[in-house]
Image (cartoon, coloured by chain):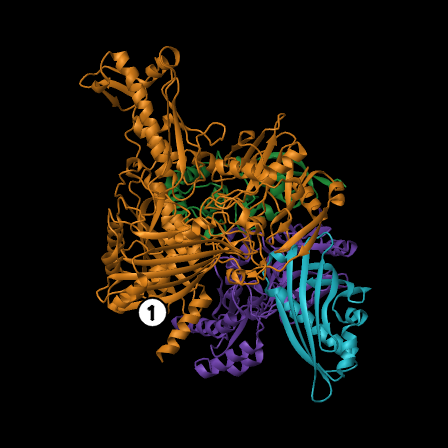
C-alpha cells in the first residue's frame, strides 16, 4: 500500500529538518502515538495505536534512518509488530525537502506500507483510507508544531 | 491458564444435553469438539460457505456465527437428527440419484437449507430454489443437479 | 455368499449406466468422515505460524514463551527437519521453512497442543528473528539482472527433466515445428495481442488437513485430505528423510481437490509434529490459511500471434508465455510445458513456435489446477480464431471446422491423436444453440473449443475374488468426490459380468494399494480404468482355467455369463464364481488375484517433426475434445456479464457413467465461469489482499445459468477401457475463451485481460462507443 | 475466550457494557462473530441483546410511523408488509443482504451499528429519512440517520451506547426501490442506490451506498432537481453533484474510478425504472 503526498510550510528548511529528525516531535505528530524512546542517533522506538471501527491494534514500532542527506532527504524504515496479536507492519519511507520561493519548505513524502498477519487478511480499501487520513492528521499536527497554520 | 469452560444446556436433535464449552464458543465448536457431532463442517468460519448450516428453533443458521451461549434453552438440529424425517429423506434420495452429491462437504448444509425452503414453499420454482440455496457454496456440481434434486423432491412430496 | 444361497440376479451391463455413487448415501446423511472428523486417542491439535515476510533469512527462533503456554506439547521449526527437499519436478522445498522464508504465509513453525485454540495461541508467542531480504514480486522483476535470488542452490537441486534453471528462472520450455518466421509471409490475415490472466484459488469446500500417528517402532500412519496417497508418501519421506517403508499414507473422504490437494506440503509438518510430540496430531487449515499457504492457478502473460490465408486456413502461430511460479516449483514446470503443448488448440497449424519461461517469485506457489495451463492459452487462442473468422467473414463454427485436427493426425510436436469427436461436439453445440434465443441489445453468443489429455505416469489395479465370488478392487486412486471409485467399480463389474454392487472398492492405502500417481490430469478413468480392466480380465482367465477343470472341457469351449458364472457354450451347465473361488481358496491353485500395472508410454515428441527443449512430460496421453457455446448478457449500467445458457459438448470416448460425466461438465463450466468473470487473487505488494471467502468470491447458485446443456459425444478410444477417455478438466478449459468471445460479440470490445469484471467490460463498452463516434 | 452475558432489559445491557471495558454488544452475530473468528476483534465480554424483548418487533405508531426494533432480523424486515410505497426500498434492501440463512441471523441494529459503508441498510435508511433510537449510560436519545455516520466505520454512537430501534416516517404511496451492483449474489455492494419518488412524481430522494464513509445524499440537489426529472441535463447535473460528494475506496470489489462511473449510471437506470413503474401504475 503506497501513501504519498506533499505539503508546504512557512518555515525554513533547516527548522523543518530539525523537527523531522527529532523523535519527540515526530512522536507528538504521529496520530495515536503513545510513547517514543530514542534508541540511538539514527533510530527510535514508538508505540502507536490504530483504530478502524471496532478493530483496534497497538504496534511496537522501530523507526530507523537508513540514509540521509541533511536538510534534503531522509530514507527511513518503520518496522514493528503487534505484540502477540500476530500482525506485522513494515514501511519504507522517503521524505524530501525543498525550498519554496517564499522562503518556506515544500515537503514530499511517500511510504510503502505492508501489513501482514491478522490485520492483513482483509480487503485493503478501508485501510488505505485510514492511512491517508492518518497522513493528513500527521501533516496537520506537524504544521502545528512548526507554529504555522494552513 | 486453562481456558474457562461454561456449562450449557440445550436441546440437540430432540434430546436435552448439557455440555461444557470454552466461554464464548461457537455452536460449531461445541458441536464438533465437545459433542463430536460432526455433520456440521468448518468450511470458512466466516458464515459465507454454508457448510456448517444447522437449524436453530427450526430456522437455518450458521453454526460458526452462532454462540453456544445463545442456544441456551433453545433447540438445535443437525443432520444427525434429521435422517428420519420424511421430507429430508426424500430430499436425500433425490440428491443421491440426481448427481447433486460430489465431494459431499457442502451437502449437509445444502439439504438443511432446502428442507427449510420446502417447509415454507412446497412447490418452489427453480429460481426460488437457487435463491434459497445461494448461501450454500458448492464448488463441485455447478448447482444444476442440486436444483434438479430439490425440485424433484418437491414434486414428489406434493403428490 | 455360501454355495446354497440364491445366486445374484444380474442387472445388465453397468458400463454406460448412471449408477449413483455409493458414497452419496453417507454424505447426504452427514456420516461421511473427512480429515477434520477423525480423532485418535490422546490426539493433539496442530497449528502453523506463517511467515509475515515475503523474503527473509531466518536467524533463529525463541520458543521459550511458546513452550510454556498452556497445553503445548511440541514445537517444530526448520531446525527440526533435515536437509531433505521435496518436489514433483524440481526438489526445491523443505518440510517447513529452513534458513529462509520465501512468501507471506509460508509455514515457519508449528505447534502441537491439547486444543486448536491453544496451539494457535502458542504460535503467536513464537519469536522468529528474521533478516529481511528484498522480495521478487513479479516474473519480470525476477528475471532482472540484479534481482534478489530466491533459491541460491538451485543448480544443486534434483530435477527430473532438462529444466534449464538459472537465477530465478525455474524452468523454460521451447517447442517448434515448421518455420514460423518464414510463414508470416504466406498469411493474408494476422492477429496479435498480449493477454494477461489472473491467479485463481481452488476453494475446495474442505480446507487441507492431516492427522499423523507414530507407532512404537517409529512407523508413521498418516491420514490426510489428498489427491494421491503416494504423492503424500513421497513428499513426506523426501522432505523428512524417512524411508518410504516407514510411512503408511491413507485417506478418508476428501472434500474435493481441483489440484489443490495434489502436491502435499501440510502433511510433512503434521508428521514432524507427531514424531516430536510422540502423540497423534491433527492439523486442519483455516480457510484463510488454505488461501495463503497452499497454491493457486498461475497468472500468465501470453503474447500470441496467429496467421491465416484468406480462405481461413491457419498457417502459423507463435506463442510466448511468462509464468509466475511462486516460491516453489511444485507442478509448475509441468503446467508450463503442458500449456505450450496445448497452445495451438485442436487445429492443424503447420508452423508453430511456443516458448515459455517460469520464474520464481516471493508469492505462494502456483500449481496444478483443473485445466493445468490450458485455460490461459485458450483464452488467447480462441479469441484469435474468432478474430480471424471475423476478418474473413467466416462464422465461428466454420473456421473451427475448417482447421480442426482429425483422427490419426499428429498434435503439435508429435503425439498421435486416437479418436476425435470434435466435429460432433461442434455439431451438437451448433444445433442446440441455434434455436430461438432471447434478444437483447447486449446479448450474444460465444464459442470455444478445447482438447485435453488423459494419461500420464504409473498406475495399477489389484482385483481379488473373495471366497464367495464377489470382488475386492484396489487401485490406490483417491476418489475426491468426482466418483472414480464408482467408475472403476463399473469397469471391473463389466469385465467380470457382475452386478455393480458385488465389487467393493478398497480405500487407498500405501501399505496395500498398487501405485497410483494421483487423481489429477483427467487420468483415473482412462489410465487406472485400463489397469482395472486388464486386472479383472486376468481374474476371468484364472476363473476360466478353474472352470475348464471343473467342467472337464477346454477353456475355448467356455463362456463368461452374466452374474458371475462360467458355462459351456451351448449348454446350461455352468459353475459360479463362488464355486470357483471356493475351490481356488481351499483346494486347487490358490485364491484368484489379478493385478496389472502400467504407465502411459507413447512418446510425446516426434523428433522428425519438431524441436522440443525442456519438455517435462516425455509421455502424456490420449486426447479428449470439447466445444462450448455460451449465451451472455451484458448489463448496460454496470458492465456485468450474466451467462444465461451454456452448451457443453465433450468427446469422452465412452461415458462409463454418463451422469458423472455431466456433472464434471457442469462443475467444470461453473468453476470456469467464476474464473472468467470475477475470481481473482489480489496482492497488495507481497501480501495476498483477499484470502477469505468474504473478499474472494466464487459463484453461488444464483450466479450461474440453470440451463447448462451437456452433450456427451462417444468416439471410443482404441486404448481406453471400453473406449473411455478423461472428462475431469475439459469442461472448464473453454469457458474463458467462449465467454470472452460472447462478450466481444455483445459489446464490440475485445478483452485481453481476465477476469471480465463489470468494471473492465464497462470500460471496454465505453471505449468502443467512443471509437464508433 | 469471551464471556457472554444475556441481559433481559436495555438498562441491564447498558450497565453491563459500562461495567466491562472491553465488552461489545452482540446482536445477530453475522458480522461480529465472523470478525472474532478471524481474530480481528477480541472482546473480553459479549453482551448479547438477543433476550431483550424491547428490542424486538416492528410496530406502527399513532401517526402511521414505523418503529423497527434493533434486533429485528433481516428476514423479518424483508417480509414486512407494512413497508410499502416509500418504505419499499428498505424491504428490498433487507431481501438483498447476504443470503437466506444469514438473513435469519443478522439484525438491522447490528448492521447499522457496524456501519459498513458497503452494507445495504444505510443507503435505504437514508433514503427513508430514518431516525435512530439510542440508549446509553446517559439515558436515551434519538438521532437522524443523516447525522449518524462521521467517518469510515466511525459513527455518532458513543462508547457504551446501543441502538434500540430505527423509526421511519409513515409510508406514502410512491415508488421506491433499492438496487445494488455486487460481484456475486449476496456480496457486499460495489455500489448501490436507494431511491424513492416524491408523491407527486416530480422529485426524488436518492442515497448512494458504498461510495464513501456513509450513504451519499444531496438534499439540496434533490430540491433543485424537483420538476426536472425528465430533463436529462438536470439529472446529469444532479448526478455530477453526487459524484463530487463521493469518496470511494479502491478495493477487491472495484476501483474508486469504477464506483464513480457507476453513480450516474445507477441513478439514471433506477430513475427510469421507477418512472416506468409509475407510468404503468
Front one among C549 and C319: C319
- Among the chains pictured, the one given green colouring is B
Q: Using the rendered image of the protein, determine whether residue D123 is visible from the camera's viewpoint.
A: yes
Q: Which chain is purple?
A: D
C667 to C199, vertically: above or below: above
Left or right for D106, reference A34: left
Drawn colour of chain A? cyan
- Number of callouts: 1
The percent coordinates of residue D154 (x first, y second) are 67, 66
Residue tagged 1: C441
Residue at horizontal 76 percent and vertical 44 percent from the top: C64
Q: Which residue of the protein is positioned furthest toward the left in this rendering? A: C570
Spot occupied by residue A71 in the image (x, y as percentages of width and height): 74, 78
Rendering quarter of residue C19: top left
Which quarter shows the N terminus of chain C?
Answer: top left
Q: Colour of chain C?
A: orange
Tell me residue C536's x, y (percent).
34, 27
- Comparing C639 with C194, the one in front is C194
Amino acid at each position: 500500500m503506497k501513501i504519498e503526498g506533499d505539503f508546504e510550510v512557512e518555515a525554513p528548511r533547516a527548522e523543518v529538518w530539525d523537527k523531522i529528525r527529532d523523535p519527540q516531535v515526530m512522536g507528538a505528530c504521529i496520530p495515536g502515538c503513545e510513547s517514543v524512546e530514542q534508541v540511538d542517533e539514527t533510530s527510535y522506538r514508538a508505540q502507536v495505536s490504530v483504530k478502524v471501527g471496532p478493530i483496534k491494534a497497538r504496534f511496537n514500532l522501530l523507526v530507523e534512518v537508513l540514509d540521509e542527506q541533511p536538510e534534503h532527504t531522509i530514507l527511513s524504515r518503520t518496522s514493528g509488530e503487534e505484540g502477540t496479536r500476530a500482525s506485522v507492519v513494515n514501511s519504507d519511507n522517503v521524505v524530501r525537502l525543498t525550498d519554496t520561493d517564499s522562503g518556506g519548505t515544500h515537503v514530499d513524502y511517500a511510504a510503502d506500507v505492508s501489513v501482514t498477519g491478522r490485520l492483513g487478511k482483509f480487503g485493503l480499501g478501508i485501510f488505505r483510507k485510514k492511512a491517508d487520513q492518518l497522513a493528513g492528521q500527521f501533516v496537520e499536527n506537524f504544521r502545528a508544531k512548526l507554529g504555522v497554520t494552513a | 491458564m486453562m481456558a474457562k469452560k461454561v456449562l450449557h444446556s440445550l436441546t440437540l436433535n430432540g434430546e436435552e444435553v448439557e455440555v461444557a464449552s470454552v466461554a464464548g464458543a461457537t455452536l460449531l465448536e461445541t458441536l464438533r469438539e465437545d459433542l463430536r457431532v460432526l455433520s456440521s463442517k468448518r468450511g470458512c468460519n466466516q458464515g459465507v460457505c454454508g457448510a456448517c448450516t444447522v437449524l436453530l428453533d427450526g430456522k437455518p443458521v450458521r453454526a460458526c456465527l452462532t454462540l453456544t451461549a445463545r442456544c441456551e434453552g433453545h433447540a438445535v438440529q443437525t443432520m444427525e437428527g434429521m435422517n428420519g424425517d420424511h421430507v429430508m429423506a426424500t430430499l436425500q434420495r433425490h440428491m443421491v440419484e440426481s448427481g447433486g452429491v460430489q465431494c459431499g462437504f457442502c451437502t449437509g448444509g445444502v439439504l438443511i437449507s432446502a428442507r427449510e425452503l420446502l417447509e415454507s414453499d412446497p412447490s418452489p420454482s427453480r429460481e426460488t430454489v437457487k435463491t434459497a440455496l445461494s448461501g450454500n457454496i458448492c464448488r463441485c456440481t455447478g448447482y444444476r443437479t442440486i436444483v434438479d434434486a430439490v425440485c424433484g423432491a418437491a414434486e414428489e412430496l406434493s403428490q | 455368499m455360501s454355495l446354497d444361497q440364491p445366486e445374484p440376479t444380474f442387472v445388465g451391463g453397468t458400463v454406460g449406466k448412471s449408477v449413483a455413487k455409493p458414497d452419496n448415501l453417507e454424505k447426504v446423511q452427514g456420516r461421511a468422515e473427512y480429515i477434520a472428523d477423525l480423532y485418535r486417542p490422546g490426539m493433539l491439535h496442530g497449528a502453523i505460524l506463517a511467515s509475515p515476510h515475503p523474503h527473509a533469512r531466518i536467524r533463529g527462533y525463541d520458543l521459550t514463551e511458546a513452550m510454556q503456554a498452556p497445553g503445548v506439547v511440541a514445537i517444530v521449526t526448520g531446525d527440526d527437519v533435515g536437509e531433505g527437499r521435496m518436489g514433483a519436478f524440481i526438489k526445491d522445498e523443505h518440510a517447513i521453512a529452513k534458513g529462509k522464508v520465501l512468501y507471506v504465509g509460508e509455514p515457519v513453525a508449528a505447534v502441537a497442543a491439547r486444543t486448536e485454540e491453544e496451539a494457535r495461541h502458542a504460535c503467536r508467542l513464537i519469536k522468529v528473528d528474521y533478516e529481511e531480504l528484498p522480495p521478487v514480486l513479479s516474473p519480470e522483476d525476477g528475471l532482472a539482472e540484479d534481482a534478489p535470488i530466491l533459491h541460491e542452490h538451485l543448480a544443486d537441486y534434483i530435477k527430473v527433466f532438462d529444466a534449464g534453471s538459472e537465477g530465478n528462472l525455474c524452468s523454460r520450455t521451447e517447442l517448434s515445428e515448421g518455420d514460423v518466421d518464414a510463414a508470416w509471409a504466406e498469411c493474408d490475415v494476422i492477429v496479435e495481442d498480449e493477454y494477461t490472466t489472473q491467479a485463481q484459488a481452488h476453494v475446495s469446500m474442505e480446507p487441507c488437513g492431516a492427522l499423523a500417528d507414530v507407532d512404537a517402532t517409529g512407523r508413521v500412519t498418516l491420514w490426510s485430505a489428498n489427491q494421491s496417497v503416494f504423492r503424500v508418501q513421497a513428499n513426506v519421506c523426501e522432505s523428512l528423510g524417512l524411508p518410504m517403508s516407514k510411512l503408511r499414507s491413507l485417506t478418508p473422504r476428501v472434500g474435493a481437490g481441483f489440484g489443490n490437494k495434489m502436491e502435499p506440503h501440510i502433511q510433512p509438518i503434521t508428521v514432524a509434529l507427531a514424531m516430536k510430540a510422540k502423540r497423534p496430531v491433527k492439523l486442519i487449515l483455516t480457510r484463510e490459511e488454505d488461501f495463503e499457504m497452499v497454491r493457486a492457478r498461475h497468472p500468465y502473460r501470453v503474447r500470441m500471434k496467429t496467421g491465416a490465408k484468406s480462405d481461413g486456413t491457419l498457417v502459423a502461430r507463435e506463442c510466448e508465455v511468462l509464468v509466475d511460479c511462486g516460491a516453489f516449483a511444485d507442478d509448475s514446470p509441468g503446467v508450463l510445458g503442458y500449456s505450450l503443448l496445448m497452445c495451438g488448440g485442436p487445429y492443424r497449424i503447420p508452423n508453430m513456435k511456443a516458448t515459455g519461461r517460469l520464474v520464481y517469485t516471493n508469492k505462494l506457489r502456483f500449481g496444478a489446477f483443473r485445466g493445468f495451463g490450458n485455460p490461459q492459452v485458450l483464452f488467447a487462442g480462441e479469441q484469435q480464431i474468432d478474430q480471424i473468422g471475423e476478418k474473413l467473414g467466416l462464422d465461428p463454427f466454420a473456421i473451427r471446422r475448417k482447421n480442426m485436427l482429425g483422427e490419426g493426425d499428429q498434435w503439435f510436436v508429435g503425439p498421435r491423436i486416437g479418436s476425435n469427436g470434435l466435429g460432433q461436439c461442434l455439431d451438437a453445440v451448433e444445433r442446440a444453440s441455434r434455436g430461438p434465443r432471447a434478444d437483447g441489445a447486449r446479448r450474444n453468443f460465444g464459442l470455444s473449443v478445447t482438447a485435453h489429455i488423459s494419461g500420464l505416469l504409473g498406475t495399477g489395479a489389484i482385483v481379488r475374488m473373495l471366497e464367495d465370488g464377489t470382488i475386492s478392487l484396489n487401485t490406490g486412486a483417491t476418489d475426491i468426490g468426482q466418483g472414480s471409485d464408482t467408475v472403476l467399480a463399473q469397469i471391473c463389474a463389466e469385465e467380470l459380468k457382475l452386478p455393480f454392487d458385488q465389487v467393493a472398492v478398497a480405500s487407498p492405502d500405501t501399505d496395500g494399494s498398487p501405485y497410483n500417481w494421483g487423481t489429477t490430469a483427467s487420468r483415473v478413468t482412462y489410465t487406472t480404468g485400463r489397469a482395472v480392466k486388464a486386472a479383472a480380465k486376468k481374474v476371468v482367465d484364472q476363473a476360466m482355467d478353474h472352470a475348464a477343470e471343473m467342467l472337464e472341457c477346454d477353456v475355448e469351449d467356455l463362456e463368461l455369463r452374466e452374474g458371475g458364472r462360467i458355462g459351456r457354450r451351448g449348454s446350461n451347465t455352468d459353475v459360479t464364481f463362488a464355486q470357483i473361488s471356493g475351490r481356488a481358496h481351499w483346494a486347487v491353485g490358490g485364491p484368484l488375484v489379478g493385478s496389472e500395472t502400467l504407465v502411459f508410454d507413447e512418446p510425446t515428441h516426434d523428433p522428425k517433426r519438431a524441436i522440443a527443449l525442456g519438455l517435462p512430460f516425455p509421455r502424456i496421453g490420449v486426447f479428449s475434445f470439447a466445444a462450448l457455446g455460451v449465451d451472455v448478457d451484458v448489463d448496460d449500467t454496470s458492465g456485468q456479464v450474466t451467462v444465461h445458457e451454456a452448451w457443453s459438448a465433450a468427446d469422452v470416448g465412452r461415458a462409463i457413467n454418463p451422469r458423472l460425466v455431466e456433472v464434471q461438465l457442469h462443475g467444470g463450466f461453473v468453476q470456469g465461469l467464476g474464473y472468467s468473470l470475477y475470481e481473482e487473487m489480489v496482492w497488495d505488494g507481497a501480501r495476498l489482499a483477499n484470502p477469505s471467502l468474504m473478499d474472494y468470491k466464487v459463484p453461488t447458485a444464483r450466479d450461474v445459468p440453470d440451463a447448462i446443456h451437456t452433450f456427451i459425444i462417444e468416439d471410443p478410444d482404441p486404448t481406453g477401457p471400453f473406449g473411455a477417455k478423461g472428462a475431469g478438466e475439459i469442461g472448464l478449459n473453454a469457458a474463458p475463451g467462449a465467454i470472452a468471445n460472447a462478450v466481444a460479440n455483445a459489446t464490440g470490445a475485445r478483452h485481453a485481460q481476465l477476469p471480465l469484471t463489470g468494471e473492465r467490460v464497462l470500460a471496454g463498452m465505453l471505449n468502443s462507443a467512443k471509437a464508433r463516434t | 475466550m469471551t464471556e457472554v452475558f444475556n441481559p433481559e432489559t436495555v438498562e441491564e445491557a447498558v450497565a453491563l457494557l459500562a461495567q466491562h471495558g472491553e465488552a461489545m454488544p452482540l446482536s445477530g452475530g453475522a458480522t461480529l462473530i465472523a470478525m472474532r473468528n478471524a481474530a480481528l476483534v477480541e472482546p473480553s465480554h459479549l453482551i448479547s441483546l438477543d433476550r431483550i424483548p424491547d428490542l424486538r418487533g416492528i410496530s406502527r405508531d399513532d401517526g402511521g410511523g414505523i418503529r423497527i426494533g434493533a434486533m429485528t432480523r433481516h428476514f423479518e424486515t424483508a417480509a414486512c408488509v407494512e413497508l410499502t410505497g416509500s418504505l419499499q426500498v428498505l424491504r428490498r434492501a433487507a431481501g438483498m443482504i447476504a443470503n437466506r440463512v444469514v438473513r435469519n441471523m443478522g439484525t438491522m441494529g447490528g448492521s447499522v451499528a457496524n456501519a459498513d459503508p458497503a452494507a445495504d441498510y444505510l443507503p435505504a435508511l437514508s433514503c427513508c429519512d430514518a431516525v435512530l433510537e439510542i440508549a446509553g449510560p446517559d439515558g436515551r436519545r434519538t438521532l437522524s440517520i443523516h447525522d449518524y455516520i462521521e467517518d469510515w466505520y466511525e459513527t455518532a454512537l458513543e462508547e457504551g451506547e446501543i441502538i434500540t430501534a430505527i423509526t421511519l416516517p409513515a409510508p406514502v404511496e410512491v415508488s421506491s426501490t433499492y438496487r445494488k451492483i455486487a460481484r456475486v449474489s449476496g456480496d457486499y455492494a460495489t455500489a448501490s442506490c436507494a431511491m424513492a419518488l416524491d408523491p407527486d412524481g416530480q422529485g426524488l430522494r436518492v442515497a448512494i451506498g458504498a461510495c464513501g464513509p456513509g450513504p451519499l445524499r444531496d438534499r439540496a440537489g434533490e430540491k433543485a432537481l424537483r420538476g426536472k426529472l425528465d430533463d436529462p441535463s438536470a439529472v446529469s447535473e444532479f448526478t455530477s453533484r453526487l459524484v463530487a460528494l463521493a469518496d470511494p475506496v479502491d478495493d477487491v470489489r472495484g476501483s474508486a474510478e469504477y464506483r464513480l462511473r457507476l453513480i450516474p449510471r445507477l441513478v439514471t437506470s433506477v430513475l427510469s425504472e421507477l418512472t416506468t413503474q409509475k407510468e404503468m401504475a
